[in-house]
Image (tube, coloured by chain):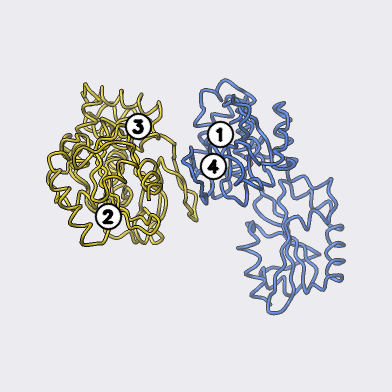
Chain colours: A blue, B yellow
Amino acid sequence: MGDDVYVVGHKSPDTDTVVSAIVYAKIKGYTPVTQGAINEETAFVLDKFGVPVPGDLGGAEGKKLVLVDHNEASQAPDNIDKAEVVEIIDHHKMNFNYPDPIAIHVEPVGSTATILAKLYKDEVAKDKAMAGLLLGALLSDTVIFKSPTTTEEDKVVAAELAKIAGIDDIETFGIDVKKAKANISDKPIKDVVLADFKDFDFAGNKVGIGQTEVVDINDVYNRASEVMDFLNDLKGKEGYEMLIFVATDIIKEGSELYYAGDKAKMEKAFNTTIGDKSVWIDGLMSRKKQVVPVIDKTF
Amino acid sequence: MGDDVYVVGHKSPDTDTVVSAIVYAKIKGYTPVTQGAINEETAFVLDKFGVPVPGDLGGAEGKKLVLVDHNEASQAPDNIDKAEVVEIIDHHKMNFNYPDPIAIHVEPVGSTATILAKLYKDEVAKDKAMAGLLLGALLSDTVIFKSPTTTEEDKVVAAELAKIAGIDDIETFGIDVKKAKANISDKPIKDVVLADFKDFDFAGNKVGIGQTEVVDINDVYNRASEVMDFLNDLKGKEGYEMLIFVATDIIKEGSELYYAGDKAKMEKAFNTTIGDKSVWIDGLMSRKKQVVPVIDKTF
């Protein structure tokens, strides 16, 4: 018994989803799986505690599944309706419909790791690697307690996990984790700028805005000329009126703005003076709330 | 704080839904409410442990609600979309969609009372009335452990609750609870026969089949002539080819069948001989599975 139940997280797996699958599967004697390849941050956390990467679920058809860190069909495995869902553990909003009663545990905390650490306190206390994985997942999902989804419980749980895992400095460990994901030095600049990129129409003008999150803005400064070349090239090729690249430092809590387009418009939008090709704006973290509205207003 | 949160069960409240609202509200310092009037069974249980009947929710608009013993919108208060749902505790299948993450606890056990008794073991251990209410609700929802939804956990929890509540004989208490609901002696016979009544079309013949559940079939035997008069009267007035009233004894696990129509058809359908006006069929519990198919076949 047991090994025929698969614990699976959401599509585009992040550290909380992968770690939750690994930890819950270990506690229950189930099999942890992912939907697709894990990212660099998750690889860093698993490697640090010597835990192997779970296999891929493959097809969901006919399998018994525990869904962790998600519940909505859009994030669940394809053909989830041909699988048997036996349980859900999650911290997201609920959008779930299933014909039989099953065990469901949802708490509005910062990570699914937080919930597992609370529910299986005794098991986690005995397992240093498990505590380390959960701490990494918790710090990842709460952006080292900076995400507005963070609760007091997350901080309390993190302190307990750090003690078990033998991690003295939670902040430093969190930065190491985020750094692993945000490491842009090995990536083509195209992938860095376009990884999270959106097109907008401001009064008939085509404007593109990309964003990346890093833990050390110097990683971006070192590639500033590459960024500028890419933006100028793309502007000409694709007919953009303006292109902006928002490089956010999650530790310093601000962003360096790179752009291709009208300098006066940028200066007006952000009420600043742009000396060279880019400008640092302290406290700017959100494209949606702090970039799009002011650029829209300027056009 | 606290008292501005309302704990509410489903529409057409039963004992598990009302007791769950009362118990969870007491534990959390919230206000228990119902959707509509409670039934006789629930009144019996509350009265036995000296607990007052909760007030009615009234409108849901603008209120903070904890939903117990249900989650689907069809069973929730009207205008639930204009309320704030803060938590769900339930043992039913899930069909829920909400824009924010909230606390949700669902377990596939026999009653919501079982879940509350497990989650708040310490609080319940100190409160005799609370344990008694929960036991009544658990026995009601599991039909004294006879419902196929019953789990081993329900039985274990019931034994613990009985000890706290000072109830020596769980079975007898369960029968007292079911008896309170199934008490038909005060009701007009029309209400007894038609409370759960369905029309069928068998090969062009209009057939009506009603069912009631009692814990002592003598309550029905005592009113047999009333039942027969009502069936014969209704048959003539409404043009039924046949009328059947299934009086199920949940303790003896069988049913007395009363009918108005062709005796030969009834005898053939149930492969029996009907001496007088009615007949006892051992093991017959389900109209859907044990009456409708055989009558359909006969026509």
Mark 2 neighbour density, 10 Å: few (under 14) some (14–19) many (20 or more): some
Q: Nearer the viewer, mark 1 or mark 4?
A: 4
Local secondary structure at mark 4:
strand
Nearer the observer, A98 or A279: A98
Q: In the picture, residue A14 is in which quadrant?
A: top right
Q: Residue at x 60, y 47 (%)?
A: A81
Write down the chain letter for disc 2.
B
Badge number at residue B234 = none
Mark 3 neighbour density, 10 Å: few (under 14) some (14–19) many (20 or more): few
Local secondary structure at mark 3:
loop
Mark 1 neighbour density, 10 Å: few (under 14) some (14–19) many (20 or more): many
**Mark 1 and mark 4: Cα distance apart in space:** 18 Å
Disc 2 residue type (three-letter)? Leu
Residue found at the very far front of the displayed protein: B264
Q: Is residue B68 visible?
A: no
Q: In the picture, residue A53 is in which quadrant?
A: top right
Mark 4 neighbour density, 10 Å: few (under 14) some (14–19) many (20 or more): many
Circles 2 and 1 on the same chain: no
Residue underneath mark 3? B120
